[in-house]
Amino acid sequence: MTRSQALKSRQASAVVAGVATKSIFVERAENSELWDADGRRFIDFAAGIAVNNTGHRHPRVMAAVAEQAAQFTHTCFHVAPYESYVRLAERLNAIVDTGEENRTMLVTTGAEAVENAIKIARAHTGRSAVIAFSGAFHGRTMLGMALTGKVVPYKKGFGPFPAEVYHVPFPAAFSGVTAEDSLSTLDSLLASDVDPERVAAFIIEPVQGEGGFNAAPGELLQGLRLRADKYGIVLIADEVQGGMARTGRMLSIEHSGVKPDLVTLAKGLAGGFPLSAVVGKATVMNSAHPGGLGGTYAGNPIAVAASHAVLDVIEDEKLCARAAWIGEKIGCRLKAIAQRQGMERIGSIRCHGAMIAFELVDDREGKVPAPQLTTQIVTEAEQRGLILLSCGTRFNVIRLLPPLTIPDAVLDEALDILEASLEAAFSKIGIRA
C-alpha cells in the first residue's frame, strides 16, 4: 500500500464523508507545482481554487508572514487593532472603483464576505429581499447556499434556506441564454413576485466560478446598474473567484466599465492564507451600527501581512498582464485541439484572462452535456501529473486556473499533458481523436 492509499484509508476513518477530496495528499509545493506523499510531482491547474494566484509559497509572501509571526499572530482587531489592517483597507479602497469614497471590512472566508455584504445592504436599504442568478456560487453557509444557484452538491438535503432570495437566469452564449433574456426575467420577477422596493441587493459574479466560467455580458451588468439606481438597490459584485488579477484586471467587473456599490474579495487576496473583504461605497458600508460587523479572527494579522505582499507582487510582477497572456496562450492551444478531427465534443472554450474553461458535449450541434467524458479527462490528467477541476451546473465543464506566476516551460508541459489526457479520454470512451 502506498502512503497516499494509507492516508486515504485513514481519512475515511477519521474525516466526515461530506468533505469530498481528491487522492493527492500534498507534502510540499512551490509556485505552480506540488509533490504528494509518494513523491509524485503535479502541475497545479487548480491553484487551491483560484487562491494561489501568486503561486504556492511566493518568497515575498512567505517573508511577510515570517516577519509578522515574529511580532504577533492574533489580538482580535476589536480588542487591539493594528496598523496593517488599516493600511490594507486603504489599499483596497483605492483599488475598487465604485465612483465614490470607499470603506473596507476584513473577514476570513468568501462566504463571510458575502454574508456581510448582504447584511450591509439590508442595513443600508431597510429591505430584506435579494436577487441572485442561476449557476451562482456564493458559499456554503445557509445564506450562501440560498444565494447559490446550483443544487448538487451544495444545496441538496440542507434546506430550508433563508427566505426572500430569488434567482434569475445567468446568460450563457453556448446554451442560448442572452442578457436580454436575463433582464426580461428580472423585470417579470420585479413585476410579479417581489416588489422592487423590498429588494436590498442584486448579487452577481461578473464571471461565474462553479457555474462554468460564463461571463456576464456588459449589457446585463449595465442593466443591473440601471435598475439598482432606479429602485435604490445595492449592486454587489462577487469577485471571490474572479478577482485579484485572475481575469487580466484586478476585478473582473472592470472589463464592463460598470461600477458596483459593494465588492466581495477572498481566495487570491492573501496568497493561501484565510482572508476576505467587503469593499464599497462609504455611504453604504457605514450603514451598519458599531459592533454589528466583524469576527474573532476577522483580518488576522498574518493573513493581512500576506495580502500586502500579494498586492505588491501583482503590481511588481505585472500579473494582470501575465494573466491575459496566459489566457491567450491556453486559449489558442485549446482552439487548435478543438479543430482537430475527433475533438468535436469540445463544445465551447471560454477564456477570461487566466480563468479558462472548456465545455464537453455529445456533439456541438446537440450540445448535450457529457459529464462522464469530463470526469475521464480529469482522471487522465491526474494520472499524468496535472491537477484539473470540473465545474458547471451540468457537470461538463473543465476549468483551468494555473497560478499567474507559472513558468513558461511548466505551462507548456501542462498543455502537452492536457492534450494527451484529452486524447486518452476520448479513446477510452470510443472516440477516435
Image (cartoon, grey):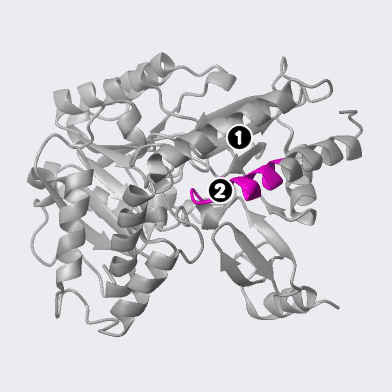
In the displayed structure, does residue 368 sit left or right of residue 325? right
Indicate which disc, 2 or 1, sits on the residue closer to the N terminus.
1
Mark 2 vs 1: CB contact within 8 A: yes
Badge 1 is on which residue?
A: 330
The quarter of the rendered structure image containing the N terminus is bottom right
Write the residue at 63% across / 25% down: 348
Look at the image and tell me in which quarter the C terminus lies: top right
Q: Specify the amino acid type for callout 1.
A: Ile
Query: Residue 77 shows which numbered tag?
Result: none
Above or below 75: residue 415: above
Note whether 79 is above or below 223 in the view shown. Answer: below
Which residue corresponds to the image point at 41% horizontal and 58% vertical from the top-left? Answer: 141
Spot occupied by residue 91 in the image (x, y as percentages of width and height): 19, 53
Q: Quadrant of residue 249?
A: top left
105 vs 57: above or below: above
Nearer to me, 140 or 197: 140
- Residue 354 placement, left or right of 187: right
Is residue 271 at all visible to an observer of this figure? yes
Tell me which residue sits at (37%, 16%) in the image.
184
Q: Identify the residue under disc 2.
A: 402
Which span is picked out in magenta? 401-415
